[in-house]
Image: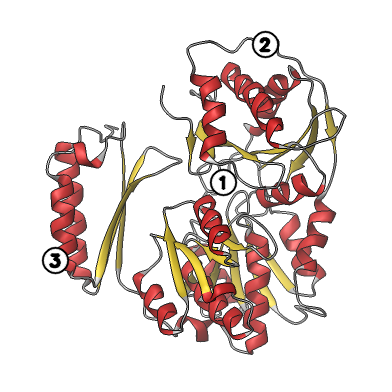
Amino acid sequence: MGKLFGTDGIRGITWDYPFTPDFIRKIGYAASLVLPKYKKRGSGKPVVLMGMDSRASGRLIKKYLVEGLGASKFKVVDLGIIPTPAVSYLVKRENADFGIVISASHNPPEFNGIKFFSSEGLKLSEDIEGKIEKLLLGRKPLSFRPSHPGLHKKDFTRDYEAFLKGTLPPGFSLKGVKVLLDCANGAAYKIAPRIFRDLGAAVKVIGDKPDGGNINVGCGALHTEKMAKAAAAWGAFCGISFDGDADRCMFADEKGAQLDGDDIISMTAPYLKKKGLLTNDGVSLTFMSNYGLLRYLKGLGISVTQVPVGDKNVTDAMEKGDLKLGGESSGHIIFREFAPTGDGILTALQTLAVVLDTGKPFSWFRRHWNRYPQVVEKIKVSHKPAFKSVSGFSDKVVKFENDLKGNGRIFIRYSGTEPLLRLLVEGESRAEIKAIAEELLEHYRKHSGAVAVK
């Protein structure tokens, strides 16, 4: 058995390992042994807050997790279907020991996941994840008696909505602004439309009819085409797509052109710098951000700290560098002034506040930096061998990087949430980078022995 935690919690296909009933109970029990030690608390029963997205499998996973937590006499507060960042916010506010979200975020419905938040509302460090894994994967089996202590249901959605509205400038209003929302048939399907309507926006919604099996299917932050087309047809000021657990968002402008996380950073970072709100005149981005964005920000005197994929890595770099803005091209954006993790609804509101204050349409911002051509590919793999162990592969990557001569880059990684190899090649010539991507993937297929046969 390999490492359980990926870039964002534990994920898999239900009901395959590690998402079998017995192992889910063990995950709950192991977490109950490790996480309370990292919180200073007074007397009283330990408390965990638990939320979930709209996947049908979430209800049973919740049951099995609670049975594991019950062995340690935890009080479990059931938040119901709620965005992941809401749990991050509420854990700290309610002084809970830790939080759990049952969600596979942007993944298809057959997947599910278990995400943990510390008492400070932060995602777990690798050290703490390692302590949980050691209990789960150690030679000595976990011995406990599952017990279901019952759930304490609590609806905190209005509190979370009030928090989000409170991050906006005084008197902020969306009155007369037409916004099309795609809620991915996920956790934001009630909360997001309500917030935008409360702020005065004219709202049209798609992806707001979850049935347990349609989350992220042809909708949401990974499938923005429908949203973009509908926004333009309706004459909206913009369109916004959330993912299944609403910790990321993507935009479309009034013409239906799609905007990703890099575009959001290109809008918000210069604005915050001009207002004197961009601490240390810097941002934190992952290696997946477009090279053109890096050059654009540098030209404006904004420094960039680059980190591996994962909003947890972005947050860590932001804390170390005292930065207030960071994110991923995938739409995970962190406004650290308000929240320690990515929040799709918060990002949408803050971005709208920036754009409206400038008095410009979204399409105006899209023209202000030159995006380098990219080829992004993925292939399914049966396992994940180190790239250095794949004969000749690393040498070929170095050769192509030298060929690009500093005007592009190659980024290869295994997905932390799915059995995938991901490849990004970026440069000034689309023909050149396409040829590089094809040759690298072909070499990997021939020499890795890791491509899944399906």
Secondary structure of the residue carrying tag 2 is loop
Question: From mark 3 to mark 1, how far is it between C-alphas?
Answer: 37 Å
Separation (CA) of disc 2 from disc 1: 30 Å
Query: Residue at 51% across / 58% down in the picture?
Result: 317
Query: Cα distance, mark 3 to mark 2?
Result: 58 Å
- The reply to whether callout 3 and callout 2 are in contact (CB within 8 Å) is no
Q: Of 157 and 49, which appears nearest the observer? A: 49
Q: Is label 1 in a helix, a strand or a loop?
A: loop
Query: Quick check: 290 left or right of 4?
Result: left
| Furthest residue toward bottom | 359
Quarter of the image where the C terminus is located: top left
Which label number is shown at residue 248? none
Tell me the residue that label 2 is attached to.
Answer: 144
* Label annotation for residue 403: 3
**Residue most extreme to the right:** 44
**Amino acid on which the number 3 mark rests in the picture:** Asp
In the picture, which quadrant includes the N terminus? top left
Q: Residue at coordinates 59% horizontally, 49% vertically from top-left? A: 244
Question: What secondary structure is found at the residue carrying circle 3?
Answer: helix
Q: Name the residue under label 1.
A: 105
